[in-house]
Image (spheres, helix red, strand yellow):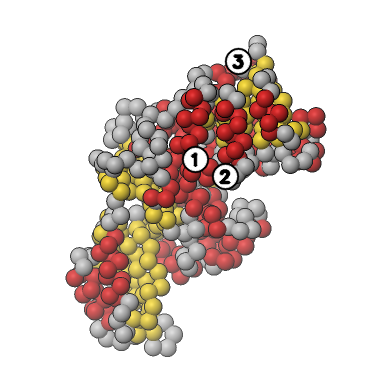
Amino acid sequence: MKKHKIAIMGFGTVGGGTYDILTQNRDHIRSTQGVDIEVKYVLDRSAESLEKRGADKSLFCSDVDALAADKEVELVVETMGGVEPAKTFITKMLRAGKSVVTANKELLAKSWSELEPIAKENGCGLFFEASCVGGVPIVRALGESFQGDKVQSIYGIINGTTNYILSKMSAEGVSYSQALAQAQALGFAEANPTSDVEGYDAAYKLSILGSLAFHTSLPYQSIYREGITRVTAADIVNAKRLGYEIKLLAIGKRCGNDIEARVHPVFVEKNHPLASVSGAFNAVYLHGDFVGDLMFYGAGAGAHPTGSAIVSDIVKALCGKPTYCDFDNNGKLDKSVNLVGDFLSGYYICVTVDDKAGVLSRISTILSDNGVSIKAATQVPSDGNAATVVFLTHPSREHSVMRSLESIGKLASVRNIDSVIRVL
């Protein structure tokens, strides 16, 4: 049996987890998949990371050009993260004819359209199952399992950090800042959590998943993005009282040439499968025109779940021909596609007003005049002369709701528009 030699670039959490699986399950992979994989090099800043992992220090490599020139190395795993120097290093490997397996969602979202043609030119592959939803095989499913279906919608909890924070807020009644501190203490959130809590990470992943699902480049810049930093403990309480959980969802829909692509907090009814996805777990709920509803669930991050997805790509790359996307991946939205900004959604609106007669009526009139139908309205007395009014709307157009809120905010009796969250 041929021995396939590979290298790992970046030996942090995910790179180390990948190494664990390749070494500890080497005999299992050899016996079940018919492929013997040996890690020849680990490229990192120093050999210290190998020592911490218990890996042989002789694997250490610090020269990316020497790695690219080694003809014994067939495939390289990239787990460095970030755009640079990862992009430069991956480009070197592809130009040297080595297939690349990466978990780098930001790099894929920004440079997929540049890297895949280089892979094609040099007869090698670019594999990225681990870039989205950790150990859950959603990339493979979208790329290879729906040839007879048109995927019409994707609803994804695809960022474990935000799901952990929102789950803590819901279960324990803590504030956003308290839940974030807990997430950071446990290593679920970075010291600078901006990419996660402001929705960038989810937007990168939706760009990749939406492109695969809808067979067209879906640039991450075209995705509407709103994070969870403005979700309050009061919103969580109101959601639960009304029969909902709040989740950060990545939403992609396609109807003909119309595509919706957005990331933002959402009220999800408690009987919906996504409402029960808690902690750092991820899930993708999709609908195909013939297959119907499907849900993919599992660990969305971590050394071994993500490493498992990487190893699956390594085996695929070494055992078969490279596969590429089935659309013109030029990094631009196709001219025939209409990106829908005035989408249809229900809305939760929480407003602080003067506690006096007629206020609710005036707000209701503004909503009605803009074509926004109220599903439910409740008024909760607050301290002093203020009251909190909570509205749920029937599905309404985004622009109509925003126009309504602009007018509502100008009413003398309205002290503040506290929260606006869309409803699934």
Q: Which residue is mark 1?
A: 111
Left or right of 201: which side holds 42? right
Q: Earlier in the sequence, mark 3 or mark 2?
A: 3
Question: Quick one: label 2, few (<14), some, or many (20+) residues within 10 Å?
Answer: some
Quarter of the C terminus within the rendering: bottom left
Spatial CA distance of label 1 from label 3 is 33 Å
Does 273 appear above or below 120?
A: below
Left or right of 93: which side holds 278? left
Residue 189 rendering spot, x and y as whole percentages: 60, 55
Q: Earlier in the sequence, mark 1 or mark 3?
A: 3
Residue type of the residue flagged with mark 1? Ser
Q: Nearer the viewer, mark 1 or mark 3?
A: 1
Residue 32 rendering spot, x and y as whole percentages: 60, 18
Residue type of the residue flagged with mark 3? Gly
At x 20%, y 65%, the residue is: 371
Q: What is the quadrant of residue 224 in the picture?
A: bottom left
At x 53%, y 42%, the residue is: 107
Q: Which residue is mark 2?
A: 83
Left or right of 264: which side holds 76? right
